[in-house]
Image (cartoon, grey):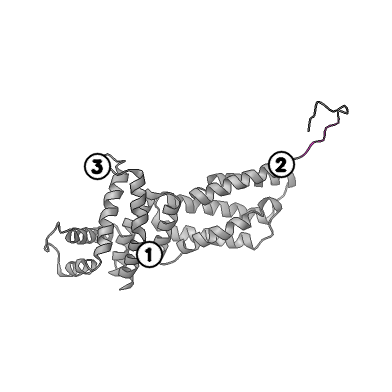
Amino acid sequence: MYDPKVEVKDFPIIDLTSFVDLQDWITNVYAFIKTGRVESLSEWIQHRENAIRREEKRTTTDLNYVRQLAKNWQELASALQTNRSMDLSNTAEKAKESIEEVKNVMLRPAFTPLNELLLNVESEIGPIADEDPINSGIAAIEWCFKHGLYQQSYTMADELMITAICLKHHMQINNIKDRKWATDILNTAIKRNQKTAGNNGEDEKDKRIVADLQNYPDLLNILHIMKDNRNDINHAGWRNNPLSSKVLEEHFISMFETYKTQLLNYYGKR
């Protein structure tokens, strides 16, 4: 604390390392909570771990659990950001397990703020770990649009309806041919709902499935808009009458609750 005015040139040194650590913690946690991006938080955890290892020259239990937590968070965030729907339940379950493990060990002071973060994160991750693909998918969609990932939200919402059709009619959700069949069925039902297609061309079973979907006109109308908006986003707006980013976001937010209710209603009647 240098002061040129004092006569006795004896200046104390104050260690502000802990204050800097606190600032880093606040910045990284804020980024994670608001955007869902975990890279900076993982890097901070890794940096603190490396510093502790250099100082103590030994391996400690809590560091192992914290490192695994950061790794599992990163895998879940990456799966959400890249639309890896088939991986979401598994990666969310691993992240959830890591949270429980960290909560049950004695953390050193550098990592105790994790306990506060975990209270909020666990409630978001838990539903994504649901074994039912529809419940897990809905939770993932909610996580995405709440963190500003609207392209992912539109894509997941579209694909989740395909998954629901497959599950309702005992088809394999990870089979490309089955998903193509469900996609054709859904597109036919949407066109009928929009009155742009006639009632012919399908076998009797497919006609019954299309007719069942037509019992949910609000859902079909929303899916029609979602598909169109998804194409708008995926083609980077290079189309006639592209929507603004604000409208794309507002559309999704305004439609989601009805989409969610109608999808669960359709899926529940199996």
Compared across the picture, whether 229 is left or right of 199 comes to right
The residue at the point 61 percent across, 47 percent down is 26
Residue 224 in the image: state x and y as whole percent.
25, 55
* Relative depth, front residue between 191 and 75: 191
* Relative depth, front residue between 247 and 213: 247
> Is 105 above or below relative to 34?
below
Give the class, few, some or many, for how many residues have Cα within 10 Å of label 1's Cα (few <14, many ≥20). many
- Say which residue label 3 marks: 241
Residue 57 in the image: state x and y as whole percent.
73, 46
Q: Amino acid at mark 2?
A: Thr
Q: Amino acid at mark 3?
A: Asn
Q: Secondary structure at mark 1?
A: helix
The residue at the point 29 percent across, 45 percent down is 232
- Say which residue label 2 marks: 17
**Of pointers 1 and 3, the one earlier in the residue sequence:** 1
C-alpha span from label 2 to label 3: 54 Å
Q: Over which residues does the magenta segment extend?
A: 10-14
Compared across the picture, whether 89 is left or right of 195 comes to right
- Say which residue label 1 marks: 134
Task: Determine the image quadrant of residue 252.
Answer: bottom left
Q: Amino acid at mark 1?
A: Ile
